[in-house]
Image (cartoon, rainbow, N blue to C red):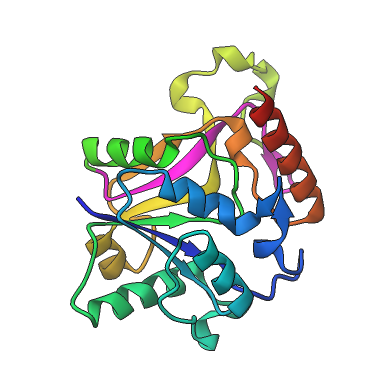
């Protein structure tokens, strides 16, 4: 089985200008995902899709391929990640190439344990999933609809967290990475489809960077993990 790691990293971030090349723990944010992918034995190619020359230069510096500059019509604030994924599929197909698996790596999630990608790919293959997402267990109780509050649990019989049955436990989608069978991605035009697998990661790998506060939190976690 062949796997491409695809990292979307457009310019123009409004929450944190220059986010993808902003330094965190001594390296550009984008560099962490590229280097983690480079350390995986089951990843055959690493591609960065961007519309920004500065990001493209950074990606190449750290060892990823940038085969083209992403078109403007799929680079704006309203463009979906799937549009960039499918654009790459179509671009590669036009050259008579494809991969078995499409690994979508989000650069905004820089914290991943060594060997994480290889372990997830092995799990994906062993369980014969069509797609996979990363999740982390949530021990919180959720409510919705403030005008008519509804709880995700029976608050008249508040359970101890350790007593919640496995089937009722909640998991948060982390957004760190996804794996999709290439043909399934092309046919459904969605990263999640068919038999979906949940790949469980620890809480520290669930943080996504969307603000300067997130940068500080993630940098602290990364420093703490480096010291262990």
Q: Quadrant of the C terminus?
A: top right
From the viewer's side, name the closer residue of 203 and 218.
218
Q: Residue placed at 62% from the left, 28% from the top? A: 153
From the viewer's side, name the closer residue of 184 and 142.
184
**Coordinates of residue 139 in the picture (x, y in percent):** 63, 26
User: Vertically, is 1 above or below 143?
Assistant: below
Asked whether residue 194 appears in the rendered view, the answer is: yes
**Coordinates of residue 134 in the picture (x, y in percent):** 47, 42
Q: Quadrant of residue 172?
A: top right
Q: Residue furthest bottom?
A: 72
Report the side of 221 relative to 61 (left or right).
right
Q: Residue furthest front?
A: 61
Report the side of 167 relative to 187 (left or right).
right
User: Vertically, is 210 above or below 115?
Assistant: below
Report the side of 55 relative to 177 (left or right).
right
User: Vertically, is 51 above or below 41?
Assistant: below
Q: Is residue 138 magenta?
A: yes
Q: Residue placed at 71% from the left, 29% from the top? A: 224
- The number of discs equals 0
**Coordinates of residue 182 in the picture (x, y in percent):** 26, 61
Report the side of 74 relative to 88 (left or right).
right
From the viewer's side, name the closer residue of 33 and 184.
33
Q: Is residue 71 magenta?
A: no
Magenta stretch bounds: 129-150
Asked whether residue 140 appears in the rendered view, the answer is: no
Q: Residue placed at 66% from the left, 52% from the top? A: 27
Q: Residue placed at 64% from the left, 13% from the top? A: 160
């Amino acid at each position: 089985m062949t796997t491409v790691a695809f990292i979307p990293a457009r310019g123009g971030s409004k929450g944190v200008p220059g986010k993808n090349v902003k330094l965190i723990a001594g390296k550009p944010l984008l560099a962490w995902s590229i280097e983690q992918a480079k350390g995986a034995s089951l990843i055959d190619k690493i591609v960065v899709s961007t519309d920004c020359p500065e990001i493209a230069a950074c990606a190449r510096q750290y060892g990823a391929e940038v085969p083209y500059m992403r078109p403007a019509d799929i680079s704006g604030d309203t463009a979906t990640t799937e549009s960039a994924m499918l654009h790459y599929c179509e671009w590669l197909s036009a050259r008579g190439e494809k991969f078995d698996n499409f690994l979508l790596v989000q650069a905004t999630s820089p914290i991943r344990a060594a060997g994480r990608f290889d372990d997830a790919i092995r799990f994906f293959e062993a369980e014969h999933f069509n797609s996979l997402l990363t999740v982390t267990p949530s021990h919180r109780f959720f409510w919705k609809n403030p005008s008519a509050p509804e709880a995700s649990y029976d608050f008249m019989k508040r359970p101890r967290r350790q007593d919640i049955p496995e089937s009722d436990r909640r998991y948060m989608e982390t957004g760190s990475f996804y794996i999709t069978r290439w043909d399934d991605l092309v046919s459904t035009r969605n990263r999640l489809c068919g038999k979906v697998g949940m790949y469980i990661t620890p809480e520290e790998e669930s943080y996504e960077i969307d603000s300067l506060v997130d940068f500080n939190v993630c940098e602290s976690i990364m420093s703490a993990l480096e010291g262990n």
